[in-house]
Image (tube, rainbow, N blue to C red):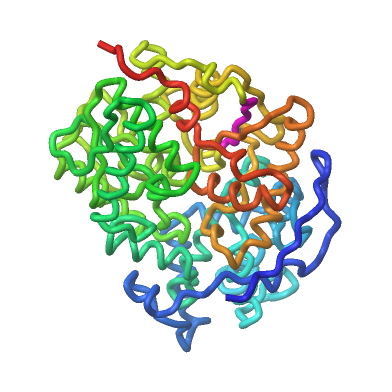
Amino acid sequence: MAKVPYTVPALDDLPTVPRIKPGAMSELKSYVAVAAHQEPLGFPGELVENWEQAAVAKMGELLGKYKSLRVYLDMCVKCGACTDKCHYFLGSGDPKNMPVARQDLMRDIYRYYFTPTGKVLGSLVGAKPWTKERLDDWYNYFHQCSQCRRCSLFCPYGIDTAEISMAAREIMDSIGLGQKYCNEIIGKVHKIGNNLGLPEPALVNTLEGLEEDVLDATGHAVKFPLDVEGAEVLFVTPSADFFAEPHVDGLIGYAKVFHQMGLSWTMSSYASEAGNFGMFIGNYEQMRKIAMRIREAAIQLKVKRIVFGECGHAWRVAYAFLNSLAGPFDFLDPRYPVPQHIMELTRGAILSGAIKLDSSANADKVVTVHDSCNIARATRMGPEPGSQFEYPRFVLQAACPKFVDMHPDATRERTFCCGGGGGLLTDELIDIRIKGAKPRVEALRDVVEQHGVTHMASMCAICKSQFTKVLPYYGYEMGMVQSVHQLVSNAILLGGNS
């Protein structure tokens, strides 16, 4: 495969609005799905002949189903509040990566076909008909949105660009113009159970290997159970946790927490994936099918609780959609939330004394944390407002003696996306991924230079994969990225718990 061209932008001080570069990202195109990726999901195998009419019909269907979509397309007043809030615009300078301009790619079509003024006055009110050039812009720029929702935080009307991008991708899938990366992965989940296509024998082998590694390293027989009927907890985690670094170090940390708590748990070979790329393509039926695997595994294994591992979009789907898509979960123990995040469980174990951490194990590190955008702006980790920010910081400060937060304009609800979320974590998009990481790296550089930060903890599988890939382009080592539960794993005291 030919090397994908890329450029690395120079880092600036926060905040910096870039020089406008029209068309800078117009040629960057994610690979298009072929029939083998499309048809198993029920989409046309290639662009249909009457795609203009089919796209208008699908848009009309979505406008009828999702009232919010019509409201978002009608209510923008072009105030400009969102223009400099997207990490892809800040990194690339391409004006079509301003959230309002990306929305207008759909708004122009909406006005032409669905509003009286657009039908009569046409381009005078910004209404434009379908053309192949416009469809190409849709494909390229709606796949340069990570659906992080930072722009919606600053919009005075709350317009959610993520919903518009999701609707655009659903329309394109319906006319046979899907994205290879997402649709191929969804097909693997339906067929095998996880994003990686990791079959059960390979999963068993991996988990047995981890048991041997932890026993050798600690002298404790920490188990990584699979398909254990009657376990208390069904644990669902991203399949990246089964092999990639630093993800797998986080998996070891989860196992140590369960072990030390004396809590019986199991993973499932049938539902061996927490991620749900159905959200990335805006298709609720695909989301539901993937979510149903977790429900079916919970019933089959007769568990009492469901706990999710570290993954941003997986937690967003679980927190916001699992009960409505795959519920009711009235067969689980009502004393526990459905679902529960591992961070809430670990925090509770620390507070109750069920586990003890020796932070001196991480004394060689000065740690900061990257708030995952999907967790920060769409979920909580406990009943309290802000728990999605406070729980990870509590766990990190218990595990690490030196913790530093990044600039407030780049953390908590204002956090920047890693640059690889929303279905962009694919090699052909490395140029926009590097550019999209720029605002986060600028905030990271600030605490490195000011406070000597050596490591950045993350609670999302995609963020970990993205940062280990792109940080070296900015001069930082990939080992700088750590799982939150990797740091817990270093610090947890095993044995001696009655």
Q: Name the spot of residue 439 as percent of width and height, x first.
A: 72, 44
Q: Name the spot of residue 479 as percent of width and height, x first.
A: 59, 41
Q: Name the spot of residue 21 as percent of width and height, x first.
A: 82, 64
Residue farthest front in this picture: 216
Q: Nearer the viewer, residue 216 or 37?
A: 216
Q: Name the spot of residue 30 as percent of width and height, x first.
A: 57, 69
**Above/below status of 482 relative to 166:** above
Residue, x 29% and y 55% (percent of image)?
Answer: 202
Confirm whether the magenta stretch covers residue 104.
no
Confirm whether the magenta stretch covers residue 370.
yes
Q: Please give left or right for residue 314 compared with residue 104 in the image.
A: left
**Above/below status of 476 relative to 124:** above
Q: Please give left or right for residue 52 compared with residue 124 in the image.
A: left
Residue, x 48% and y 86% (percent of image)?
Answer: 50
Task: Examine the image and state in which quarter residue 196 appears.
Answer: bottom left
Quarter of the image for the C terminus: give it. Answer: top left
Residue 385 visible in the displayed image? no
Which residues lie in the magenta part? 365-371
